[in-house]
Amino acid sequence: MEGRLMLMKCAGCGALRLPSRRHCDVCLSDQTEWVQASGRGVVRSVGIMHQRYHPGFQTPYNVAFVELDEGVRLPTNITGIANEAIRVGMPVVVDWDRYEDVALPKFRPA
Ligand SMILES: [Zn+2]
């Protein structure tokens, strides 16, 4: 795990595809390349979850949409701050949550 946030980019028109998918929504091309994202963005929405949907989840936890500097929105969690202090418009930076063989891109205040 290299700690790089990568985005799928259409090789036909340059549109970013998030979530990654075979065909471009803009030009329908199936040609792609991968580009490294800045890892920076802004919180665009946030919700605090109180229902425990999985035994591994500790409630309450937040679910946020972060708009990356590249313009796409990523569902994620905000770390390093109390849930009630998270604000829409808050600048954030990627903060990897690493497991054995997986790293999840979460975000902390910039
Ligand atoms: Zn395209």
Image (cartoon, rainbow, N blue to C red):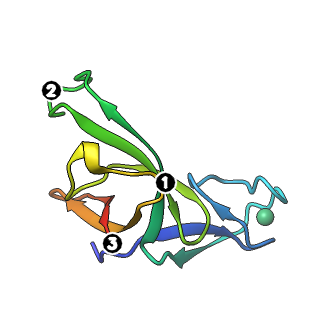
Q: Which residue is mark 3?
A: 110
CA distance separating discs 3 and 1: 16 Å
**Considering depth in this image, is 22 or 6 the residue closer to the camera?**
6
- The quarter of the image holding the N terminus is bottom left
Q: Quadrant of the C terminus?
A: bottom left
- Upstream in sequence: badge 3 or badge 1: 1
Residue at coordinates 47% horizontally, 71% vertically from top-left? 6
Q: Looking at the image, is mark 2 or mark 3 earlier in the sequence?
A: 2
Q: Position of residue 47 (x, y in %)?
A: 39, 36
Name which of mark 2 and mark 1 comes first in the sequence: 2
Element on which disc 2 rests: loop
Q: Vertical placement of 109 versus 73: above or below?
A: below
Mark 2 — residue?
55
Residue 30 location (% of width, % of height) = 74, 60
Tell me if label 2 and label 3 are in contact, CB under 8 Å: no
- Height in image: 87 above or below 71? above
Left or right of 49: which side holds 59?
left
Tag 2: residue type? Answer: Pro
Amino acid carrying mark 3 in the image: Ala
Judging depth in this view, the residue of 86 and 65 nearest the camera is 86
Q: Nearer the viewer, mark 2 or mark 3?
A: 3
Q: Secondary structure at mark 1?
A: strand
Q: CA distance from mark 2 to mark 1?
A: 24 Å
For image coordinates 21% across by 55% down, the residue present is 81
Give the amino acid at mark 1. Leu
Q: Ligand 1 falls in which quarter? A: bottom right
Q: For mark 1, what is the residue? A: 74
**Residue in the picture at 62% in, 52% down:** 21
Disc 2 and disc 3: Cα gap in Å? Answer: 30 Å
Q: Quadrant of residue 23?
A: bottom right
Q: Is residue 100 left or right of residue 86?
A: left
